[in-house]
Amino acid sequence: MRRFYFRLGDRLGHYVWGRRVVGHVLRHRRFYENFEAFFTALVLALLIKRFIVDAYQIPSPSMCDTLQEGDRIFVAKFIYWFCDIQVGDIVVFRTPDCIFTPDKPYYIKRVVALPNDHLAIQDHRIVLNGKVLDKPEFFTRNRYYEWLSNGKRFEPVTVPPGEIYVFGDNSGNSYDSRYWGGVPIKNVMGKAFFRYWPLNRVGLIRGVPPFKEFLSAPLENLAPVS
């Protein structure tokens, strides 16, 4: 950058107004150096927040006990550029149009089924494509309810193409795909992977598959999720 500034100053030196500008900058050099550092840091922070990692606060008890109300977490926004969504992932997503409200533009839930999967709940267990879901191991410990708070029963369903189904871990107190259906994959913003607050529970979020597919896949096989 210094070479660029020297060349720019040299060019401006051919003009009276340019020499005045260069003189002003030289007299206030410390200010402009600090401003450049601040501006660069701000741009990098915005790029990281937009494309790499963002922080969220859990607004409700729907993901208890995995995530408690008030927990603060990091979400990897880049990961699904390189690998597919997995059953068991905890994802942040823009709410589908059918349930969108300005005060709740984002939800966080756990993925329980992928496009074209057949999904059911039997004996408090998730049955996926005819088999009891047991991976990750979290699914063998958690309980799921097919009878909903509105008095209706969650009926077996085949997930539409291009969508995923998501449930809250606190199945008895979660407004999720059992009520309103699938989430378009394009709405998924990233994968929750780390809790940084409160301090007594800092660490990786339990019951979430690792980024093993991303870490182990040959580079030429990595492709964005469409």
Image (tube, grey):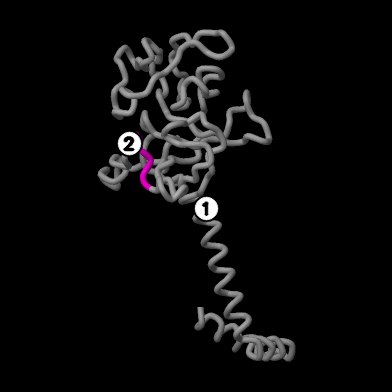
Query: Which residue type carries mark 2?
Result: Pro
177 lies above or below 5: above
Q: Which residue in the structure is indicated by mark 1?
A: 49
Kindly identify the residue that appears in the image at 55 percent across and 73 percent down: 37
Kindly identify the residue that appears in the image at 52 percent across and 53 percent down: 49
137 lies above or below 6: above
Please tell me which residue lies in front, 63 or 88: 63
Residue farthest to the right? 17
**Residue 167: mark in rendering:** none
Magenta residues, start to end: 203-208
Dot 1, how many residues are within 10 Å of its Cα: few (below 14), some (14-19), or many (20+)?
A: some
36 lies above or below 74: below
Kindly identify the residue that appears in the image at 39 percent across and 19 percent down: 143
**Residue 209: mark in rendering:** 2
**Disc 1/disc 2 C-alpha distance (Å):** 23 Å
Q: Can residue 187 be spotted in the picture?
A: no
Query: Which residue type carries mark 1?
Result: Lys
Q: Can residue 112 be spotted in the picture?
A: yes
